[in-house]
Amino acid sequence: MLIRIEGLRKSYSMGREPVPVLNGIDLSVSKGSFVAIVGPSGSGKSTLLNILGCLDKPTSGTYFLNDFGVHDCGLDRLAKVRNESIGFVFQNFNLLPRLTVEQNVELPLIYASLPNSVRKEKVRDILGRLGIWERRKHRPHEISGGQRQRVAIARALVKRPDFILADEPTGNLDSVTTRYIVDLFHELHRAGNTIVLITHEQDIAEEAGRICRIEDGILTEA
Amino acid sequence: MSRFYPKWTDAVTGIRQGFFEISSNLRRSILSITSIALGIGSVMLINSLTRGSKDHALQRIERMGGTDVMTIETVPARSLDQKILFTRSPGLRYRQLLDITRKNSSVDYPLPQLWLKSGTVSTANAARETNALSVTWDYFPHFNLAVNANLGLESAVGEWNRGAGICLLGEDLALELLGNRKINPQTLRFGDLRLQVVGVVSGCEPRDWRRKAIFIPWKFYLAKIAGPESRLDRMMLKIRDPSRMETVAREVESSLLQAHRGVRDFSISTPEEEIAAKTKASRILSLVGNFIASLCLAVGGIGILNLMWSTVNNRMREIGIRKAIGATSRNVFFQFLTESATISSIGTALGLTFGTLPALLPPGVLPISPRQTPLDFLVCGVVGNAIGLLAGLYPALLASNSSPVESLSHV
């Protein structure tokens, strides 16, 4: 099992009172699966995404990634896990505006301390596969929304992570580009990648092989 | 467990981002860089000027004849009362110094020197405008000058001390006037005087004015030009034991006061006083200058702190993205610290250049020659960069300790 979450809880302090957001979540994701987590605003989607993406730690419960317990890891270890095992695709692309397409995609490889020649090779490969090699010298504001999301996907894939964690990946795209990105996710899934898609759009969630619904901090299989 | 040390990739990213920050916040960056450059440049300049001033004082003392010579000078009257008072005194005379030399066993010999008015020195074939200096023969060995006398050294000394109408030429003047540094006895004219050239004086430094001077015997000057009872503006006394300089100076002062009927129309300066005065002035200059330079550096440091602080706040989302894709706190810390160091390094480099420029000017352009040492560059380089690192420390910590979730939620 790639992801194994049991009894996961997360609460935030609002003044003196703790406010629970996730109320005992259990989730298992096997390698190569395409899972969508769907829910309305305020359901706890983003909090679950932050914990799944090792950006935040749970208040209680366990989270095993590749049988490694990440729920009690230190910050540097979590950074390493994020770098090695998780590929993020954000709703608003989250590309660094000052860097070129090529430099944005290269960034995770730099933090992994890979040699320059290996980095260049991997970047060329992934940009070629996603059809944006010609745009490598452009900055994010010089390319279209669809191309930006492809760059974000390239950055997520370049280190061959254990799974791709996509947060509303089509939220800022028109219908044609949305279709293209969804097809791209299908293609990646067919190539053996594990994808966890978090969205509030039911039609996008239905593209996944498995749908989980989150509501009031409780996750259920749809 | 990862160790806390910088990685070259963080440094490269930091330097790149540092330049980007400079171009993005051009005015603030220029102000911070300028402050650092001014501070470092001022420290360099002040230290080099202080050192140059000390060198200048030592050179002056060398020119004065070394540390075993005291100088007695006539003080000009500054008011009508003083003018009236000074008329009671016979003034500074050569005879008084001869008396002091005879009576005070600590005084070796007097070293009179007198500049005559510049005039034309001419031979049958050439003429040159030059200065004349009237001295006793002791002057030459005392200032380590060699005399190449064409009538034999002993005869030349004898003639000189007798006050004969002879002269010596500085080596450049000899070359220009007679076309040779080794000359045969011949007569030339200096103003109304007819003088026989008996040799050439050599051993002066390349830019020394005495290379083009004409030297005249002191006794000849007294007998033919000034008269034996003429007043002098300046006179020097060679002391046997320089360690007794202050005591001898007091004794000489007492004797002169007696001869001048209690009127203090002269001043006595010793090499120690000269060094002390220069050193004190240099120390005050150095203190004030370094204080101002420190203020500049502090302003520069605060400028960098301000710049980096707002940079971190403006780029909080970027920090979140970097952390999301695997940057550790250490990566972010060193990236921002390098950005800060890049700005201060540019300021430091400019400051070092600015502070070095006066030392590169040709000699003679400035009244003193500033001098730097490798230690100046090392200390200023370290201080300039340390300011950048210190100023960048807090913003870098702020960036590295930020939570990825909170950073990503920044708009």
Image (tube, coloured by chain):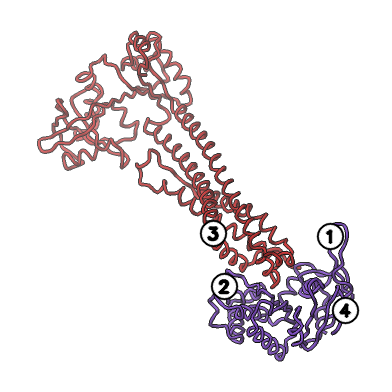
Q: Which residue is mark 4?
A: A26
Q: Colour of chain A?
A: purple
> Residue extending furthest bottom?
A190
Q: Colour of chain B?
A: red
| Residue A41 placement (x, y as % from top left) | 78, 73
B57, B323: nearer the viewer: B323
Q: Rate crowding at label 1 as few (under 14), some (14 to 19) or many (20 or more) other CA atoms within 10 Å.
A: few
| Residue B403 placement (x, y as % from top left) | 74, 64
Q: Measured along the vertical axis of the image, is residue B338 above or below residue B287? A: below
Marked residue chain, label 1: A
Q: Label 1 to label 3, Cα distance in Å? A: 40 Å
Q: Residue at x 84, y 82 (%)?
A: A28
How many marks do you count on the picture?
Answer: 4
Q: Measured along the vertical axis of the image, is residue B302 above or below residue B261? A: below
Query: Which dot marks residue A141?
Result: 2
Query: Which dot marks residue B269?
Result: none
Q: Which residue is mark 3?
A: B22
Secondary structure state at the residue bearing disc 3? helix
Q: Rate crowding at label 4 as few (under 14), some (14 to 19) or many (20 or more) other CA atoms within 10 Å.
A: some
Q: Nearer the viewer, mark 4 or mark 2?
A: 2
Q: Quadrant of residue B87?
A: top left
With B394 as the anchor, is B143 left or right in this view?
left
Q: Are marks 3 and 4 on the same chain?
A: no
Q: What is the three-letter code of the residue carrying label 2?
A: His
Q: Nearer the viewer, mark 3 or mark 2?
A: 2
Q: Are marks 1 and 3 on the same chain?
A: no
A215, B85: nearer the viewer: A215
Query: Which dot marks residue A14?
Result: 1
Q: What is the three-letter code of the residue carrying label 3?
A: Ile
Q: Are marks 3 and 2 on the same chain?
A: no
Q: Residue at x 37, y 12 (%)?
A: B82
